[in-house]
Amino acid sequence: MVKHLVIAALLLACAISGTATNRALLIGIGNYDQQKTGWSKIHGDNDVDLLKPQLSKRGFADIVTLINDQATKANIVDELTALAERSEPGDFVYFHFSGHGQPIRDDNQDEGLMKKFDESIIPYDACRDSRKMDGKYVGQNHLIDDELCPLLDAIKTKLGPEGELFVAVDACFSRGIERGEEIEVDPELYRYVRGTNYAFTPPGRITVASPKTFSEGAKLTVVTACRDDERNFEYKAPSGKMYGSLTYYIYVLLKSDADFDRWRQCFRDKAYCSRGIFQGIQHPSIEIFL
């Protein structure tokens, strides 16, 4: 009898250890130091406060947040690395960034001769142009997509084919925006546009290796708040608080479930159009990597 109980306990322990974990890393920056960095105030920090409780309700037991001055480039890289290290095969992982974004000159030419710019998310300590930091800023604190992709790939690989990685970027990397659209948008929203169409052109060459294609592993979904020729407008919720439009739509999805399959279908079907969260001139994009 005792032997049977021991065996049962061991089997239970094995079953528990093999249970997938839902994990999330949420990054939200609103209070950029405009004098030091040139970036205007937005409400990315509100986005973390909105999403974290909903993720907890949906079974995300491992949630790490970086808000405002916590979200330096070094800290973001460290937390993404740590997330990959503690992730296990079969886990479901959600990574969210809310803040500014900016196109940056493509020095390794991995984007092709026609595009000429990489995309970058803007940590708390990144500057809008090289006039900042007494002229010593050369883009070292931008988190370029060439740097971000290998960090995501490490998580994707660790999760294995049974896991999933869902990435939401509520920023903007816009280029070539037309000013004629302004008449279609509430003027108040222009105060809180995320990102800029001003491309960062470092005074010196940035040495970043071209990322390889994504490895086999978990399904990776990346959604962004708008196309690269559009602005990313914030959304004024019924409460009067401002949030990222992509963030608020994901919050709406989380009210029902954390089913990434359903989320993907909602973005593919453009189900968000009936919600009045995104401006009519703003179109979220989705990419899927198997």
Image (cartoon, rainbow, N blue to C red):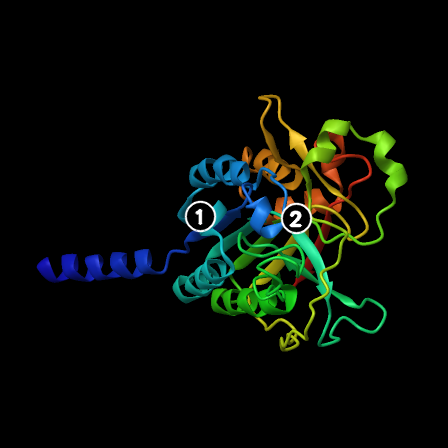
Disc ID at residue 83: none
| 40 sits left or right of 151 in the view | right
| Residue 249 screen position, x and y as percent | 64, 37
Dots 1 and 2: beta carbons under 8 Å?
no
Residue 98 seen anywhere in this rendered image of the structure: no
Q: Position of residue 208 (x, y in %)?
A: 62, 75
Crowd class of label 1 (few under 14; some 14 to 19; many from 20; radius 10 Å): some
| Mark positioned earlier in the residue sequence (1 or 2) | 1
Which quadrant, please, contains the N terminus?
bottom left
Residue depicted at x 47% and y 48% = 69
Q: Position of residue 26 (x, y in %)?
A: 50, 48
Closer to us: 52 or 116: 116
Q: Could you say which is closer to the camera, residue 171 or residue 10? A: 171
Q: Give the amino acid type for the residue marked by disc 2 in the picture.
A: Ala
Most extreme residue toward the right is: 180
For the residue pair 131 and 90, the one nearer the viewer reads as: 131
Name the mark on residue 65: 1
Identify the residue at image location x=64%, y=64%. 145
- Left or right? Give the position of 199 relative to 256: right
Element under disc 1: strand
Q: Position of residue 121 (x, y in %)?
A: 62, 56
Quick one: label 2, few (<14), some, or many (20+) residues within 10 Å? Answer: many
Mark 1 and mark 2: span between their CA atoms?
Answer: 17 Å
Q: Which quarter of the figure is the C terminus placed in?
A: bottom right
The structure residue drawn at horizontal position 60% and vertical position 39%, both measured from the top left corner, is: 41
Outermost residue toward the top in this view: 239
Q: Amino acid at mark 1?
A: Thr
- The number of numbered discs placed on residues in the rendered structure image is 2
Looking at the rendered structure, the secondary structure element under dot 2 is loop
The correct choice, above or below, for 207 with respect to 279 in the image is: below
For residue 171, the mark is 2
- Who is closer to the viewer here, 17 or 59? 59
